[in-house]
Amino acid sequence: MIKRRPKTSRKASGQERQAGIIATAASLFAARGFTGTTTKEIAKAACCSEALVFKHFPTKRALYAAILAEKVPLTELLTVVEDAAKKRDDRLVFTMLASHRIRRGADPTLLRLLLFSALEGHELSNMFFKNQHRVFYDYLAGYIEQRIREGAFRRVDPLLAARSFMGMLAHHRLLHEIFRVPAHRTPEDCVDSYVALFLDGIQAGTPAARKTRS
Amino acid sequence: MIKRRPKTSRKASGQERQAGIIATAASLFAARGFTGTTTKEIAKAACCSEALVFKHFPTKRALYAAILAEKVPLTELLTVVEDAAKKRDDRLVFTMLASHRIRRGADPTLLRLLLFSALEGHELSNMFFKNQHRVFYDYLAGYIEQRIREGAFRRVDPLLAARSFMGMLAHHRLLHEIFRVPAHRTPEDCVDSYVALFLDGIQAGTPAARKTRS
DNA sequence: TCCTGGTGAGTAACTACTCACTCACCGAAC
DNA sequence: GTTCGGTGAGTGAGTAGTTACTCACCAGGA
């Protein structure tokens, strides 16, 4: 990926190389999984020798771990959502969460990496999942719980409700990014539909224990 | 797995062996993926030699394909759901679908196999997905569309609504079976919650374009 | 002269897959 | 009842190629 530094030197610095290897390896691991990717392929894609890869990372697993460990940042979204939450703008809160997941330029690498690491049972998978996803559930469940206390939402299990909503989004991405199901609506339409469906289900004013229409 | 036939003979018949190899290989592929599973391991788990595995299946991929192709039956559920659908018992329709997915003895093998095959990009993955899952969406979307025409459901995109509901279920299984998130409710409670949440969101009588409370 | 970035040429173990071969069984000829 | 040949189940010992990983060594800038 990195072949030469812009100006004087032909050699890349250690950090540059390391970052380059991580980036190229990440896309390969995301595409083919851990066991499906060879160190030879990684080296070739990173335009260097296999030996250099092992100079930077003692083992293939260590490289994989470095990739998972690197993909942690996420909190920036929550601070923006927090604003909407303070104003009790339910629709905005859920729309922001949804459109952060479902949008045109979303990177499928993370999702594939997450799924592969969980399926293949990598030791860092759990931490990766926690940083990438769990924070959403916990935060959202907290918000839902509060809105229930305030009488705005029906009395439901907050964690289950949070998972329902995030489940719609995760499943949407799964269908399109992993199973290649063609989209028949724009991302914005989908977001609006999911949010409307969910909010109308949870907001107070609808009979909670309604049975089927007779 | 199969070591000897019940009575006279010590040798297993060709069909018995083949079925045994498929079954053991399926659980290995589900656990470790295609590239993560070796033919040696398969042979050992099936209590036979590697050579015999290749007597039955010309290549490792052919064995994998045979496994995916074998896991097709599913229609029996839809016929039962059909009854509830005829009676327009919405709650029962959705509860049956949900509890078919979320139940105590559910086999995690299929889900893992499905995910692995999609991630690893196996050629039969798409067919597998179609047989295992797509039939649900199409059927459910059809039912939802009909209920909208009858005025029982709000005017939403039927396919998107169907995916929302199945998404809740799929995500629920994903969290517990793949990411090992501990359950904090019984499966029955979860099913009830999901169904209630979804039905209250989609059933007519709730203001469709309600904005956030001011 | 070092030190850092970089590599070619390995290695032992493992991979999917092959082949020549044995063994158990069974129907039929004697 | 015994022998015999055919057949399908089953395998040990390979194969060539690939795997993750190592090491002695080189180039060039400070």
Image (spheres, coloured by chain):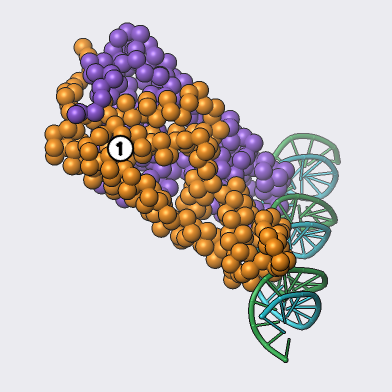
Chain colours: A orange, B purple, C green, D cyan
Q: Residue A58: image x %, image y %?
A: 59, 71
Q: Residues within 10 Å of mark 1 (few under 14, many from 20)?
A: many
| Residue at which label 1 appears | A93
Is residue B46 something that shows in the picture? no
Instruction: Say which quadrant the C terminus of chain A sits in.
Output: top left
Q: Residue furthest top?
A: B150
Horizontal arrangement in the rendering, residue A63 relative to residue D6 (left or right): left
Q: Position of residue B77 (x, y in %)?
A: 41, 25
Q: Where residue A185 sits in the image (x, y, percent)?
A: 48, 23
Query: Image check: C16 left or right of B154?
Result: right
Which residue is at a point 52% across and 38% down the rendered structure image?
A105
Does residue A82 appear in the picture of this structure? Answer: yes
Image spot of residue B126 (x, y percent)? 58, 32
State which chain disc 1 sits on.
A
Residue beneath the point at 54% across and 29% down? A181
- Which residue type does callout 1 highlight? Val
Label 1, secondary structure: give it.
Answer: helix
How many numbered marks have been drawn onto this rendered protein structure?
Answer: 1
Asked whether A23 or A170 is in front, the reply is A23
Is A174 left or right of B145, judged from the image as shown? Answer: right
- Relative to A43, say whether B7 is above or below: above
Picture quadrant where residue D11 is located: bottom right
Q: Is residue B32 above or below residue A162?
A: below
Q: Nearer the viewer, residue B38 or A69?
A: A69
Q: Residue at x 28, y 45 (%)?
A: A82
Which quadrant would the N terminus of chain A be assigned to in this image? bottom right
Residue at image x 58%, y 30%?
B127
Q: In the rendered image of this protein, does residue A121 appear above or below residue D27?
A: above
Depth order, front residue of A5/A64:
A5
